Image (spheres, helix red, strand yellow):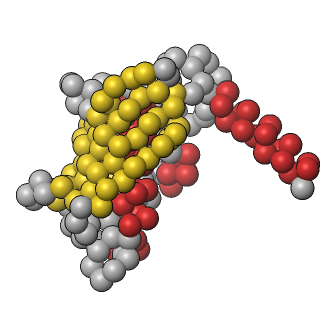
Amino acid sequence: MAHQESATVPSGPAEVRPEPSLSPGGVGLCAACHRRGDCRLGLRTEVLEDDGSVTTELVCDESHEGGPGVAHGGWTAAALDELVGHVAMQHRRLSVTGQLTVRFLRPVPIDRPLRATARRVREENGRWFVHAEIALAATSAVLATADAEMVLREWSHFARFRTWLADQDAQG
């Protein structure tokens, strides 16, 4: 799939999202990471596979260390949330996480190559159900998994949020 950078949020139809802004390794970048030019969660490469799944290489660096030599559980959950969102992103769809269930199977080591996969399991009523796993790159030992319900949204979702937040600010 050919990619091109897009620096602004489009106002076009919800059904088709423009190509995501990408890191040099092909990782789709969220707004904050777009400003940095790379993924702050350590996603290094990303590929949209022929079967529609997304494969990612990542590393948890020491800035996200929880226990000695292992990733903080918050990093693991955040990385899995990012991964499930990338399935829709790589298919040029906008989604937000409606529900995320994380299973911590083994500690995730810091500064070690990891490999993650995420795939859509099913689609129902404007929602994509996505499964993701993070594994050691060297052995494919699965360390953590997530199941998510991703709610497909139109680009006006963020404008509606800004309006809602301004209303909240006016009440405060």
Residue at (38%, 67%) from the top-left corner? 73
Front-most of residues 7 and 139: 139
Give above or below for 96 relative to 24: above
Question: Horizontal placement of 121 versus 129: left or right?
Answer: left
Q: Check the image and name the residue furthest to the left.
A: 139
Q: Quadrant of the C terminus?
A: bottom right
Front-most of residues 45 and 85: 85
Residue 112 appearing in the image: yes
Q: Check the image and name the residue furthest to the bottom.
A: 68
Q: Quadrant of the N terminus?
A: top left
Question: Can you give x and y, in whole percent of width and height, for residue 152 in the image?
Answer: 51, 27
Question: Can you give x and y, in whole percent of width and height, for residue 80 in the image?
Answer: 37, 51
Number of numbered discs overlaid on the protein picture: 0
Give above or below for 14 relative to 23: above
Question: Horizontal placement of 51 versus 140: left or right?
Answer: right
Residue at (65%, 23%) from the top-left corner? 11
Residue at (72%, 33%) from the top-left corner? 159
Question: Can you give x and y, in whole percent of width and height, for residue 8 in the image?
Answer: 60, 34
Question: Horizontal placement of 162 versus 95: left or right?
Answer: right
Question: Can you give x and y, in whole percent of width and height, for residue 95 in the image?
Answer: 50, 33
Q: Quadrant of residue 69?
A: bottom left
Q: Quadrant of residue 118?
A: top left
Residue 61 appearing in the image: no
